[in-house]
Amino acid sequence: MLRAIAIHGAPFSFTLLAIVLSHEMGHYWTARHYRVDSTLPLFLPFPFSLVGTLGAFILIKSRFPHRKALIDIGLAGPFAGFLVALPALVVGIATSRPGPPLPPETSIQFGEPLLFQWFTSLVWPNLPEGYDLYISPVGLAAWFGLLLTALNLIPIGQLDGGHASYALLRGGAHRLSAWAFFAFLPMAYFGPSWLIWALLLYGLGIRRPHPPTRVDDIPPPRSRYAMGILALVVFVLCFTPEPIVVDWSDIWSGFRESAP
């Protein structure tokens, strides 16, 4: 038991925590640079899940001084976590192994972001046709790191993407949040968990506009608009519409057959 934890659990846990910690420390140190009062990262353990955690966060205790600081602090987190997830992804895919597919009821299949697909094709160019790649613990942690990065970059409310969109668009950021929220409703096609996520997004800022910075009428420099475009690229590379691949038609058929 302890040997299995050391071989599989420890690499996964250390890699995932490194990605999450890098994300939050990116926020923290950038906030320190702009003299914004914030706490150190606070982790949220959640043992009843695939990853054992709900991630981490920092508490901002003072207003952002201006929109340049807002986008810098907001995007420093996902950029830092992304930079740590990249080498973990390469190592994780390289240490994975190909094999014939298992029956769906005995395995969990994960959706593949574009970046995951590209790295897989580079590391395993001759993967046998019809074979699956059984992801290693480090690769699985990197996969969750990509998903975490994508979710945080959604341009809604108090998410990192919401901070960035307000810094760049100001008044238009709330309209963008509304469009992003409604765009998530059709995602329920891939699984009902997206409806739960849509409700969380609604609570994170759809109901009210983003709070202004202290000096809110000065736009950020042009370089920050380039940062916004880079954040959009990172989001596209990391996002997958179906994180956990589930055949809901089979589940629904089984439910109907078991119903009295």
Image: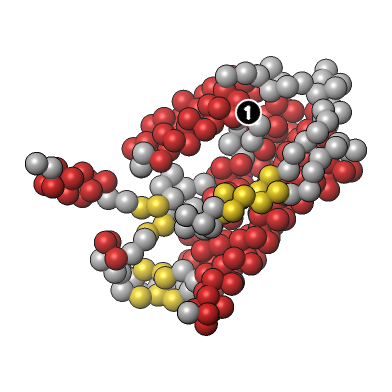
Percent position (x, y) of residue 209? 65, 19
Residue 122 visible in rendering: no
Locate residue 71 relative to residue 49 in the image: left or right. Answer: right
> On the image, which quarter does residue 34 sit in?
top right
Residue under the point 53% across and 75% down: 5
Percent position (x, y) of residue 176? 58, 24
201 w.r.t. 109: above or below: above
Residue sitting nearer the eye, 26 or 50: 50
To which residue does mark 1 refer?
157
> On the image, which quarter does residue 111 sit in?
bottom left
Residue under the point 59% across and 29% down: 204
Of all residues, the one furthest to the bottom in this rendering is 3
Percent position (x, y) of residue 100? 31, 74
Residue under the point 27% across and 61% down: 104
> On the image, which quarter does residue 71 sit in?
top right
Residue sitting nearer the eye, 221 or 179: 179
Name the kind of residue labelled 1 in the image.
Answer: Gly
Residue sitting nearer the eye, 20 or 115: 20
Percent position (x, y) of residue 150? 57, 45
The mark total stands at 1
Locate residue 247 relative to residue 145 in the image: left or right. Answer: left
183 w.r.t. 6: above or below: above
Tag 1: Cα neighbours inside 10 Å, few (<14), some, or many (≥20)? many
Residue sitting nearer the eye, 254 or 157: 254
Residue 4 visible in rendering: yes
Residue under the point 23% across and 48% down: 251
User: Disc 1 on helix, strand or loop?
Assistant: loop
Specify the color scheme: secondary structure
In the picture, the quarter occupied by the C terminus is top left
